[in-house]
Amino acid sequence: MVSRRAVSTSERAATTDAAASVQTLAVLLQAGAVPLVAWRHLADTGDPHAIAVIERVDEGTPIVAAIEAEKGVWAELAAAWEIATIVGAPLAEVLRMIAETLRDAASAADDVRIALAEPAGTARLLLWMPLAGLLLGFALGFDSVGVITRNPLGLACAVCGLLLVLAARAWTGRLLRKAAPAPGTPGMRAELVAVALAGGASIDRALQLVSQTAAPGEGDGRVRAVLDLSRAAGVPAVELLRASAAEDRHSARVQGRLRAARLSTQLLLPLGVCTLPAFLLLGVAPLLLSVLAATPLPS
């Protein structure tokens, strides 16, 4: 669960950093720098991704492959870079669009994580409640350890309590992972098709280029629906695709907030089924057994 949170935070930071780097590249290209020189200028600022890209290029790797090797959102940038190069679209404008897309996606993901922070933090805090109950017994002077080690009933309570704690952690972690934002940039596939169309490619050619350069995604059906609407209505597909991509990011933000709202209720299940019984078994039961063991039997 902790590792998942670290990964999510890392992905958010990577998207935000990538947006700033791509924006800088767009400005450099707009000012007249050739692509490789722009990457070298960016590397001179200390950008770790740009440094890695330049090192690969100096070793003979093509620039698109060097960008794609950074993985994550950089693979999406590599796809946009390659498509723009093939169709002859203005690279600086394409990079500005990608930077705006990445910033918007990072903002949407931040909103979801903020909404998830309170229920997730509460759930992690409550997972320590059974062990806190055990420590409370020590603080009050009860011989909880003696009860657990010498009394078979106390040992059974401790084992069952620990198993319930582990079950609660696994259950809570599963709920948190299910509510977390999905990887990838919402609407990026529509943006890539729009890049190809803006460069003069036909619809079939644009779809082919995107399928060749980008990883398979879930947005293919939506992209085709937008293209069908463009044909039927006789309106430019580029603007419709970019509007569709913006709607995808808005939908991701809204759905993420709804998942966070549902999570607050869903976390009550492991609390009631596992955490509270574990608290009784680890915190209350040893106290009662300790009191019973210390109480003299009537003569």
Image (cartoon, grey):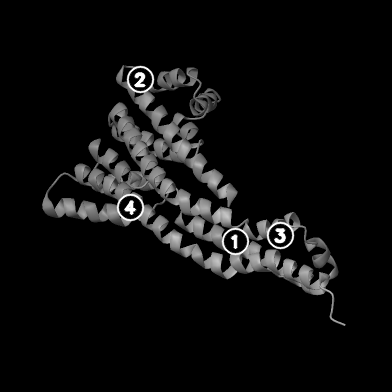
Could you tell which of marks 3 and 1 lies nearer the N-terminus?
3
Say few, some or many: other residues with alpha carbon within 10 Å of mark 1 (under 14 / 14 to 19 / 20 or more): some
Q: Position of residue 134 (x, y in %)?
A: 71, 59
Q: CA distance from mark 4 to mark 2?
A: 35 Å
Mark 4 vs 3, N-terminal side: 3
Residue with the most extreme bottom position: 299
User: From mark 3 to mark 1, how far is it between C-alphas?
Assistant: 21 Å
Up-down: is 1 above or below 23?
below
From the top left corner, tell me how far across and down residue 63 is, in percent: 45, 29
Kind of residue sitting beneath label 4 = Val
Query: From the viewer's perspective, is the residue at label 2 or at label 1 nearer?
Result: 1
Label 3 near label 2: C-beta < 8 Å?
A: no
Q: Which residue is mark 2?
A: 28
Secondary structure beneath disc 4? helix
Tell which tag, 3 or 1, sits nearer the viewer. 3
Which of disc 2 and disc 4 is earlier in sequence? 2
The residue that appears at 65% across and 68% down in the rendered structure is 280
- Name which residue lies at 60% across and 57% down: 127
Asked whether the residues under the numbered discs 4 and 2 touch, taking CB atoms below 8 Å apart as contact, a structural biologist would say no
| Circle on res. 213 | none
- Mark 4 and mark 1 in contact? Answer it, CB < 8 Å: no
Q: Amino acid at mark 1?
A: Ala
Residue 253: image x %, image y %? 34, 49
Residue named by callout 3: 134
Q: Is residue 158 visible?
A: no
Seen at 33% across and 22% down, the residue is: 27
- How far from the left and from the top, in percent, is residue 81? 37, 33
Identify the mark nearer the N-term, 2 or 3: 2
Q: Which mark is residue 254?
A: 4
